[in-house]
Image (cartoon, rainbow, N blue to C red):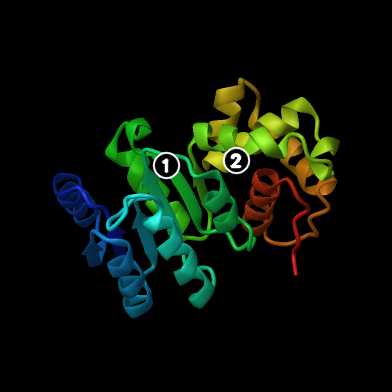
Amino acid sequence: MRVVLAEDLYLLREGLIRLLEAHGFTIAAAVETGPELLDALLTHRPDVAVVDVRLPPTLTDEGLQAALKARREIAGLPVLVLSQHVQQLYARELLADGTGGIGYLLKDRVFNAGQFIDAVRRVAAGGTAMDPDVIAKLMQTTSRRPGPLLRLSPREREVLELMAEGCSNSAIAARLSVSDGAVAKHIANIFGKLELAPDEDANRRVLAVLTYLNGTAGQTG
């Protein structure tokens, strides 16, 4: 699996390279500026991009801007944002096309290699991997919007939030202290209330999460 990595801090960049290579990834490019990132993404068209938000030359939002531009050229390009900061506007724009393959992790909340590698693989496969703090920031505005999310019960919203984090059914059951069967029933209810037409469960799962994070109705077309 080929990765383009963007991180301006030398030690962190080198550490991420070694970690990814140790788990079987190939580093197609490792860059430290926004322009280099955009060029690398369009040139290498990797299986997944791991991107810091703030890159030179201005250390504001070059990483996310480059990722957004690349996704406009390469539909569905998987992007995992790894940052110390939550940029709500650009995070929403990454989520808005409804294709999945999006993750947003906070550097100081990645506690072990397994957590990080699992997130990279999940995003590369078209899923989501969202830090709970990022979800909370996005939901500060989403929760005030009308729409299909209002049909969900409090428990169903809890289940959907854990789905957004990338939790499996068994992991959700453990977190909520309920049975796997109860989780499956809640997820079926979520699909129905969000009007997600029958499809592969993995695809509906991603669409449900994107609906949750965007606060708008999901589409299956």
In the displayed structure, does residue 97 sit left or right of residue 72?
A: right
Disc 2 + disc 1, Cβ < 8 Å: no
Residue 2 visible from this viewpoint:
no
Crowd class of label 1 (few under 14; some 14 to 19; many from 20; radius 10 Å)? many
Numbered label tally? 2
Which residue extends farthest front? Answer: 58
In the displayed structure, does residue 139 sit left or right of residue 35?
A: right
Crowd class of label 2 (few under 14; some 14 to 19; many from 20; radius 10 Å)? many
Residue 111 visible from this viewpoint:
yes
Q: Residue at x 37, y 46 (%)?
A: 82
Quarter of the picture containing the C terminus is bottom right
Which residue extends farthest top? Answer: 177
| Residue 146 pos. (x, y %) | 84, 41
Task: Give the camera-side residue of 28 and 121.
Answer: 28
Q: Is residue 11 above or below residue 43?
A: above
| Residue 155 pos. (x, y %) | 73, 27
Q: Give the mark nearer the N terminus: 2 vs 1.
A: 1
Secondary-structure class at tag 2: helix
Q: Amino acid at mark 2?
A: Met
Q: Amino acid at mark 1?
A: Leu
Residue beneath disc 1: 105
Secondary-structure class at tag 1: strand
Quarter of the picture containing the N terminus is bottom left
Task: Give the camera-side residue of 146 and 125.
Answer: 146
**Quadrant housing residue 27:** bottom left
Residue beneath disc 2: 163
| Residue 138 pos. (x, y %) | 60, 39
